Each structure stands twice: as structure tokens, then as C-alpha cells.
Image (cartoon, rainbow, N blue to C red):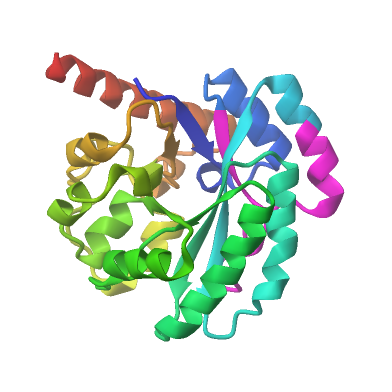
Amino acid sequence: MHALSLHHLCVMELPAVEVIDVAAELGCPHICLFTFQPGAALSMPIVTDAEVAAVRRRLRDAGVSVLGTTSFALEADTVIAGYEAGVERSAQLGAQHANCRIIDGDEARVIDHFGRFAEFCVQRGLIPLIEPSGYGQVDALPQALRIFAAVGHGGLTLDPLHITRTGTRWEDVEALDPALIRYVQICDGPAEAPPEAYFAEGGFDRLPPGEGDYPLDRLLGVTPEGMPLSIEIPCKTLRDRGLAGRDLAAEIIGRTRAWLERQASSSN
């Protein structure tokens, strides 16, 4: 069964050092953290320069590693030089990946921005990623592939929410070169949702696997053997029941493990 990574988005009320402790206690050897504020619309609990040393110590003591850091939005007005500090913090935390989302219709500018971001990452030993996203953006995945070809670096983050909401065909995901798939997130949700629900789904309202309509068996089918799965399930349903912090993480992780065990049993 795939190892699990606890995404900070699941438990944003906890500081990074507590996310590490919760992950270790619940048997997740990896976490995903924020090292740069992705935008004004949603405030994330980022790891600041002043916190890096304490977070590094806690990671070491708990035996947990940072699978990835997120989310560096490539927008029309992005000052890409400003992202170098976040990438540097990612490297200091020992992260393997740094993840971008594209929010810009000018592909030439995006190529320039991602190329410079990739340079920051490669210089520090991180793999720069693009997470194809955007409601109805059926070109999101092909665009990411064009950007990688132009820049010469990069890998894909696959998220079933965004695969579903962009309108990307699962056949196209399954046709990808497996070497491009570097990071896989897991969550579930309804097959259809109105455009106005997209922002809330992304930040607050997802479901554990097996409790929605996403074809997650197909996601597992393209996940390279041995690759950890990042649990990115900010779950309004469970929060409405009063769960938060460690208790919320335990419920989400428990349901994810139970689903993975069912999948493993059914394939034997």
C-alpha cells in the first residue's frame, strides 16, 4: 500500500510543528507544507524564515519528511523573483518538490515564469511541479506538457478534483509518460459541481476517498509504484461534525487507509 503524506490544507488550524507530530503519531511518514502565501483569496499557515530551524528539528526528531511544498501561483502580475525565498525555505526543510498552479492566460509569460521558478528549484535540488487546474480548463494538462517541453524541466501533480473539474479526460491522464507523474494527491467529491463551488471545494470542501464519485481506481492505476499519496482533504463534512486538528486528521487518514485496503483486497 502507498505511504501517506498529510497535507497541511487538511488541518490549517495547526502550526507546522504540530502537523509533523500528528503525521508521525498517525503513521504518515511525509507531510506537505506551505512556504509561500499563494494569494490574497486564501490565507495559508506558511512556514516563515523564523520557523525553519524549529520545523527542521521537529521533522528530524519525528522521522517525518516534507514530500512537497505548495502553492506557488503563476499569475499575470506574479513577480517571480519574489518566489525564490519560498523555494529556499522549501529546500531548507528538505522538501522534494515545489508545486505551481497556473492562473494566467498568456502562455509565453507562463513559460517564462515557470522557467525561472524551475531554475530556483533545480539549483536547490527540488523538482518543480505544475498542478493542472482551473474550472473548465480542458487545456490545462496539454498546456503543462507544452511548458515542460519549452522549459526542459518539470513534473506533474495529479489531483482528482482538478482532473474532474477541468474536464480532463482520464484516458489522457492514463496515456501520460509515467516519468512525468511526480506527485499524486487524493480526495473525492461529486462528479459535477457548479463553477461557483470550485474555490470552496479546493480549499475547504472535499471528501475522503470512496465517499464521492471520482474514479479513484484510475488515479491509483497511474500512480507509480512506491510513490506516496498526499492526503489533500480539507473536509467541511467532518468539520461540521465538530472534528478539528488531530481528531480530524485521524478520521481522514483512517478513512483513506480503509479505502486503500479495500482497493488492495479487490485487486487480489
Lateral position of residue 166 relative to residue 203, left or right: left
Residue 146: image x %, image y %?
34, 69
Residue 48: image x %, image y %?
78, 53
Lateral position of residue 63 relative to residue 23, left or right: right
Image point (45%, 47%), residue name: 234
Q: Quadrant of residue 15?
A: top right
Would residue 43 be seen by someone viewing this image from the given angle?
Answer: no
Q: In this view, does 81 lie above or below 132?
A: below
Nearer the observer, 25 or 148: 148
Q: Is residue 60 above or below residue 221?
A: above
Would residue 7 be seen by someone viewing this image from the given angle?
Answer: yes
Nearer the observer, 67 or 147: 147
The boundaries of the magenta stretch are 30-56
Q: In this view, does 127 lie above or below 248?
A: below
Residue 27: image x %, image y %?
52, 19
Confirm whether the magenta stretch covers residue 132. Answer: no
Residue 250: image x %, image y %?
48, 26
Q: Which quarter of the rendering shows the N terminus?
A: top left
Q: In this view, does 24 lie above or below 69?
A: above
Nearer the observer, 157 or 252: 157
Image point (41%, 64%), residue name: 148
Q: Quadrant of residue 18?
A: top right
Image point (63%, 56%), residue name: 121
Q: Quadrant of residue 38?
A: bottom right
Q: Which quarter of the rendering shows the C terminus?
A: top left
Image mark count: 0
Confirm whether the magenta stretch covers residue 43. Answer: yes
Image point (22%, 19%), residue name: 264
